[in-house]
Image (cartoon, rainbow, N blue to C red):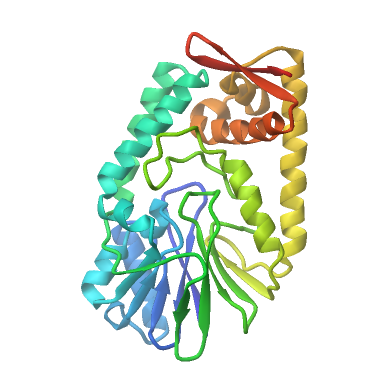
Amino acid sequence: MIHCLPIPTPFAVGRVNTYLVEDDPLTLVDSGPNSATSLTTLEGALAERGRKVEDLERIVITHQHIDHIGLVQILADRSGAEVVALEGLKPWLAQYRDGMEADDAFAEAIMARNGIPEDVRMALRSVSSAFRAWGAAATVTSTVREGDTIGFADRTWTVHHRPGHSPSDTVFHDAERGELIAGDHLIKHISSNPLISRPLDGGAGARPQALVIYLESLAQTRAMDLARVLPGHGEEIRGHRPLIEERFRLHERRARKLLGLIAERPRTAYELAQAMWGNVAVTQAYLTLSEVLGHVDLLRNDGHVTEVEDDGVARFAVA
């Protein structure tokens, strides 16, 4: 039996779904953010099922975002549970604050290149620094790779790396039951944001094409036979293929709209974001920038758009 335990977060996405797997070993998937309110809620949800934190034997992490990893170490310290995560995520979690600082520097360089003014960049960096306390370092004691299995007394999960929303997105497939523990890889009520993120290995190469990577991951999930998907936010999903097809259509429509804007005149990604979303492009500058660059990547890869650099700032023009 798998129980969904929604945990409050301070973020616009609302509650995050953690999952209690009533099997041997007793397993929790994700943890919620690092806050007393989240911990109290989780303790109450466990108590309703006759369990307590100290009963946990394993904690499985779907990806690196702070609403999913904030309480991991607290729970592991209290329970002695093993902590399971993607192999590449282990060093990032161990050096959480250094990793977040490097991630912020990476994001700031991308924002500068794509026309976001310095005052907006500084404001966003301050917000990001303040948010860091909702996450925390954690020690991963068991690592997994693509194709590995995680065993229980009554089920087996196959591990699949599905990057795009984050570099570490990991889903867990119970083929016998047709169940997928999906984290934020696929969510019913909103499209998962393909955030442009620093690669887990630190990567000094070209900027990752997050949306291109994400669509490739979605295509792999579309090919799976699934009865239900258990997401990191919102309701469970039954009928994953029509939902994924709608996501593909959404991104195609958005790319076409951006091509129309670029055809009017060359613009920076920040100018394109403002044209698409108005003031949201300021208050959610990195989120909307990631959206724009993702769709511009699709247009560039198809030969419709080219990038022109002017004094260190990139503008996009019709090819």
Q: Nearer the viewer, residue 84 or 33?
A: 84
Work out whether residue 199 can be spotted. Answer: yes
Q: Quadrant of the C terminus?
A: top right
Q: Is residue 87 left or right of residue 271?
A: left
Q: Is residue 307 left or right of residue 259?
A: left
Which residue appears farthest toward the front when viewing the image?
205
Which residue appears farthest toward the left when viewing the image?
77
The residue under the point 71% across, 23% down is 305
Q: Is residue 169 above or below residue 177?
A: above
The residue under the point 74% across, 48% down is 248
Image quarter of residue 106: top left
Q: Nearer the viewer, residue 316 or 44?
A: 316
The residue under the point 45% across, 83% down is 151
Q: Is residue 241 above or below residue 294?
A: below
Q: Is residue 184 above or below residue 133?
A: below
Q: Is residue 25 above or below residue 199?
A: below
| Location of residue 27 in the rendering, given as x and y in whole percent from the top left corner | 40, 78
Number of marks drawn: 0
| Location of residue 174 in the rendering, given as x and y in whole percent from the top left corner | 57, 78
Work out whether residue 190 can be spotted. Answer: no
| Location of residue 96 in the rendering, given as x and y in whole percent from the top left corner | 28, 49
| Location of residue 132 in the rendering, given as x and y in whole percent from the top left corner | 31, 44
Q: Is residue 66 left or right of residue 133?
A: right
Which residue appears farthest toward the top when viewing the image?
311
Q: Nearer the viewer, residue 1 or 222?
A: 222
